[in-house]
Image: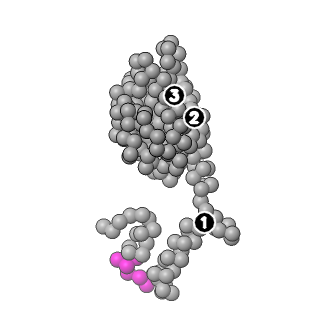
């Protein structure tokens, strides 16, 4: 299970929240990675399947500097993101006219592009209260959603697993696995992990 966490911070709070989410998701078994938002443009972002976004708001409801290039790439796109799941934490201050402006406009744009918001947006007022609870809930909902996407055969077993078993059986050709040398075993099993040859 993969999760990509994107953040844009001004004072460091958004980065801190993103790091906590990173640790919690890894503890839950995710292969998680964390990036500054500007590490992505729309093309690379559109390839992500499971995304968490943590952003503060800068100035008059603007996206912080470390996320502004990403936002400019996203703002006027109309390509749908129907195969993507996302959740978003917005940090802000109600003393400003546009409370959580950056998070709100990113979230609204992703909703318009049909990225699947799997949990309500969290809006924090002047602190990071609620981010831990939100992170725990987000991880659980995402994990349940990913598990629910597995195709099951009529016998109740995972179709992907069944197909992999058939591939292995065909390559073994009725031989006992313990009789196969290491190099041949690598060739048989490595394609199933999605890794290329060394």
Q: Which mark is residue 75?
A: none
Q: How is the image coloured?
A: one colour
Q: Residue at x 41, y 44 (%)?
A: 45
Residue 117 located within the stretch drawn in magenta: no
Quarter of the image for the C terminus: give it.
Answer: bottom left
Q: Are marks 2 and 1 in contact (CB under 8 Å)?
A: no
Secondary structure, mark 2, is helix
How busy is the neighbourhood of tag 2: few (under 14 within 10 Å), some, or many (20 plus)? some
Q: Main secondary structure of the magenta part?
A: helix
Q: Is residue 169 visible?
A: yes
Tell me the magenta residue range.
179-185
Q: CA distance from mark 2 to mark 3?
A: 16 Å
Q: Earlier in the sequence, mark 2 or mark 3?
A: 3
Q: Is residue 155 left or right of residue 92?
A: right
Q: Residue at image x 41%, y 82%?
A: 180
Q: Which residue is mark 3?
A: 104
Residue that carries the numbered disc 1 in the rendered image? 158
Residue 183 located within the stretch drawn in magenta = yes
As helix, strand or loop, the secondary structure at mark 1 comes to loop
Give coordinates of residue 186: x percent, y percent.
38, 73
Q: Quick check: marks 2 and 3 in contact, CB under 8 Å?
A: no
Query: What SS does tag 3 mark?
Result: helix
Mark-to-mark CA distance, 2 and 1: 30 Å
Closest to the observer, 21 or 165: 165
Q: Which residue is depicted at the point 50% across and 34% down?
A: 109
Q: Nearer the viewer, residue 127 or 10?
A: 10
Residue 134 is marked as 2
Q: Quadrant of residue 149?
A: bottom right
């Amino acid at each position: 299970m993969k999760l990509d966490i994107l953040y844009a911070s001004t004072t460091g709070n958004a980065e801190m929240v993103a790091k906590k989410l990173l640790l919690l998701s890894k503890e839950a078994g995710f292969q998680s990675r964390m990036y500054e938002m500007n590490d992505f443009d729309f093309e690379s972002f559109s390839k992500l399947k499971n995304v968490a976004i943590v952003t503060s708001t800068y100035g008059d409801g603007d996206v912080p500097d470390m996320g502004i290039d990403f936002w400019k790439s996203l703002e006027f796109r109309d390509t749908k993101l129907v195969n993507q799941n996302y959740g978003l934490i917005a940090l802000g201050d109600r003393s400003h006219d546009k409370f959580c402006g950056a998070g709100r406009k990113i979230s609204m744009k992703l909703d318009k592009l049909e990225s699947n918001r799997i949990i309500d947006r969290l809006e924090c007022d002047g602190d990071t209260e609620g981010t831990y609870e939100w992170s725990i809930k987000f991880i659980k909902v995402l994990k349940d959603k990913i598990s629910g996407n597995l195709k099951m055969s009529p016998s109740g077993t995972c179709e992907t697993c069944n197909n992999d078993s058939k591939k292995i059986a065909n390559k073994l050709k009725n031989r006992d696995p313990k009789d196969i040398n290491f190099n041949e075993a690598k060739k048989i099993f490595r394609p199933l992990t999605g890794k290329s040859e060394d």
